[in-house]
Amino acid sequence: MSNTKGSLTNFGKAGWGTILYCLFMFFFYVGMINDGTNVLAPAAAENIGVEPGTIIQWNGYAGMIAVIGFIIVGQINKKIGARATSAIFTILAGIMYIVCGNATSLPVYVIAMVLCATGMMSAGYIAGGTLVATWFPKRKGIVMGYTTMGHNFASAFYVAILTGLVAVFGSIKGGSVPIGIAAIILGIIGAIFVRNTPQERGLNPDNVSDEVYKKEYYTASDDSKEAGGWTTKALLKTKELWFAAIVTGMFQICSVGVMQQLVTRNIRDFGMSQAGALTLMTIVALIGVVGSWLIGAIDQKIGTKKTMQGFGIWYAIALVINVLSGGHVGILFYLSIFMIGMGIGGSANFTTSLPTSIFGRQGFDRVNSVIFPIQGFVTAWCFVINGIVTNVIGNLNYAYLIFAGAAIIVSIAVSFINEYKYNKDHQVEAVYEELEADAEATFEKPKRA
């Protein structure tokens, strides 16, 4: 393997630009759709005249309805490319977020949230995932470690930013406008500067040299280069696709479900002040910045499969410890908070890393168009679980135990997958490394007696 592929930082200017673009899309996704609901849900509920739990629950249903949008966007992404798709739907999300903040009826809010969730999740995961798989097929582990820092930065600062904007403008109606405008600007930047492939910038995938690319990457185009040999029908009949979609979606349930109501839980169940809960969320998220990078680096070093096995156990233990703290802010509580912080960004790493490992970059836009709607549908259940548990029981202990169980199930289930089954680049590199090993063995000098 070349030194460039093993590097954790050598991506080139264009590569770093692509990474930062994906990072900011994740920032807006987590802020708008997940963590920001700590502020948006009660404010929107007050505008509309319903309980906050109702808004949270409908956010979950909106995420499920958005799955239909993911299917449509996946087809659009195949037709017009990740650059245009990400730009268009980031702009759409920005507009719809402003509508969410200004909605005075539940139907208007739900429709706007469906379009906002469809837009921002499609931009970040469908288009962004395609960009990562195309630009960094063998370094997707560490690259996703960088891009998912956007999740953690959002968790650290988004709620505080939105709270400040609401204070400045007097309500969520005005506070949502600057956020929406910022997302629109990001979409415009993407349309101007981002490219679908590294070749459009005169580069090779993973920023490797021409020599390495010819030796260690699949370059033939005899089996439909655009589709990677896949059709949508064939993908839907492939068990690895369903497996990858469901297990990565279940990991997302864990982290999204926790962070979406972290502030509310710490205020209601642990007796914290709002300021204290917001400060703690910021600390958790900043820990998560380190965690995202570390999980990405581990993924790069030992592979996605082993990393997911360890991650599931780690996250389940963190959630169980949090429940065992019994509403008391003590040693167990802070230990669980540290462990949750280290893991919150990691789950999102796998949404692109595992499918890329299994299917490779060839035709990843088609693979992602099928896999992400399934991931999104599974992930959306966290909102429903949180909403129902909040309304029925009044605290989130049982939700946390459900999430912990999901993490353990994934940790066990992923053991049975063939991590590189359809990955052509990996197959070529494996043959090359085998030939090199044979050559070294052939020419090795005999040892003296």
Image (cartoon, helix red, strand yellow):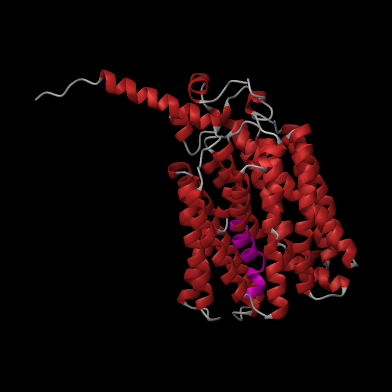
Magenta stretch: includes residue 198: no
**Which of these two is toward me, 45 or 1?**
1
- Residue 294 visible (yes or no): no
**Which of these two is toward me, 422 or 77?**
422
Q: Quadrant of the C terminus?
A: top left
**Which of these two is toward me, 345 or 159?**
345
Question: In the image, residue 246 lies at what x, y percent?
Answer: 62, 53
Q: Is residue 10 above or below residue 93?
A: above
Q: Is residue 400 above or below residue 178?
A: below
Which residue is found at the position 72% from the left and 67% from the top? 384
Q: Quadrant of the N terminus?
A: top left
Instruction: Classify residue 433 as left or right of residue 147.
Output: left
Question: In the image, residue 25 lies at what x, y percent?
Answer: 69, 47
Instruction: Classify residue 161 as left or right of residue 99.
Output: left
Q: Which residues are magenta?
A: 251-265
Question: In the image, residue 413 lies at what x, y percent?
Answer: 52, 55
